[in-house]
Image (cartoon, helix red, strand yellow):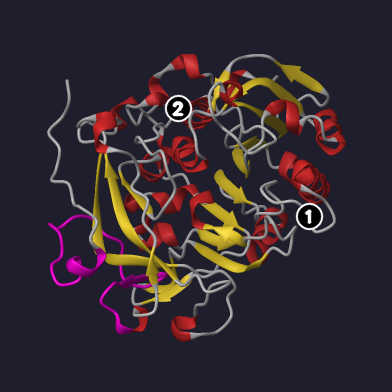
Amino acid sequence: MFCTSFAWAAFNFVAAVAAAPAPFTAPFVGGGVYQASDPRLKDYAVASTPPFSPSVYGDYYVWRVDNNTVGVSNATAVEAPLGLTNYGSDNTVYPYFEIEKPCDKPVDFSSEYEGKGTFKKILHILFENEVFSWTMSSPYWRVLATRGKLLTNSHGVSHPSLPNYAAFIAGDTFGMAAENFFNVKGSTIYDLLDHKGIDYATYAEWYTPSNTSRGPCDCNQSPFMGPLDGSNPDWSSPVYRRLDVPALLFSSYTTNYTRCSKIYNATDKFAQDVNDGSLPPYSFYVPDMLHNGHDPASDSDYLHQNDEAGRWLLSFLDLYLPALQEQGTLVVASFDEATWTNDSDAVPNNNNSIVTMLFGSGVTPNTMDDTYITHYGALIGAINNFGLGSLSRNDTNVTNGDLTNLVW
């Protein structure tokens, strides 16, 4: 049985400038978001990939597009009109797609409880796009496995990358089957955390908060930021991507200035918060496109991009793990999805088998666990650890696993 859907909006960038679609939750203008009618965008082309085909889900998931509200690519951070420029001649804007699950159940705050309290803090570090066997072929990841617990039956929940990031914090992919300027209208773990008064943060490499009318630390919705990563020319790309930051995918987060102020440039803030003990109970660290394994280093090739990620994580643990462990932090290092070495995620897609490693509090080094777990199980672990209630989605399905059951 499907839910009643809202009206679909056909994509027509030029015509829609004069007539806005029916009101819905669009992001504020600023922080990488502009009105399509802005004359400064006259030389920008439009790139648009809908989240999914309407025929796939009927009315279970639905989307619409606000052609007046667009995100502007910023690939090099070199000053230009709007303070933005793009590599090559690809000056691109991305229309704002809103995605919704009309039959979504409400957040269940009544099911809050004391929680297991297994960990004082949980820190997620997210990596990109490699199947378990490919990742573990790297000597760096084999060394990393000796420093923590390797989960040998861990799985992404979808393809491509973006819906997996939504799954981490919302317990659903909302039907997304592509990557663009998507915004989900729905609740997340941050609603549960706020209701219980538990603090959180996101630390993203190369991220720069926006100074808007709402304040100096607003959400920056730019699809890309920072310079090109300088890696192999065939794979060179902007070092920062919005889609890798889970919180930015949800309008329930980005329309709230207080929440936006809790997304930081990792270089400016992370070391300070770890060293002075102020890292909040629930946090994400988002490495850049070299450190997360998406791109190869300049002196390597595509097949060895996981080496770069492994080297980075070893250094990260050398710097921060002693303090994090002392503060009772579970560090969860996980890939978003599994792809073959030829970058294909087609069927049979390796059962979306990914590497997840646990470090820090409650973890016995150089151990393995073959318990089945998905990204939803990571969310379930946080909910059960802090006693947060329920989002009434896949966080209620115990077959997805539970991180709190995999330690001690």
- At x 46%, y 44%, the residue is 198
Dot 2 falls on a residue whose secondary structure is loop
Instruction: Look at the picture and state if 368 lies above or below 182.
Output: above
Q: Is residue 300 left or right of residue 289?
A: right
Magenta region includes residue 406: no
Q: Quadrant of the N terminus?
A: top left
Q: In this view, does 60 lie to the left or right of 20?
A: right
Residue 67 visible in the picture: yes
Percent position (x, y) of residue 172? 39, 32
Magenta region includes residue 20: yes
Give whichever of 370, 68 is nearer the camera: 68
Dot 1 falls on a residue whose secondary structure is loop
| Mark 2 → mark 1, Cα distance in angstroms | 45 Å
**Looking at the magenta stretch, what is its main secondary structure?**
loop
User: Where is mark 2, residue-wise?
Assistant: 114
- The local crowd at label 2, few if under 14, some if 14 to 19, many if 20 or more residues have their Cα within 10 Å, is few
Give whichever of 267, 77 is nearer the camera: 77
Question: Of label 2 and label 1, which has the lower sequence position?
Answer: 2
User: Where is mark 1, residue-wise?
Assistant: 297
Q: Is residue 181 left or right of residue 324?
A: left
Residue 313 visible in the picture: no
Percent position (x, y) of residue 328? 68, 37
Query: Which residue range is magenta in the image?
Result: 13-39
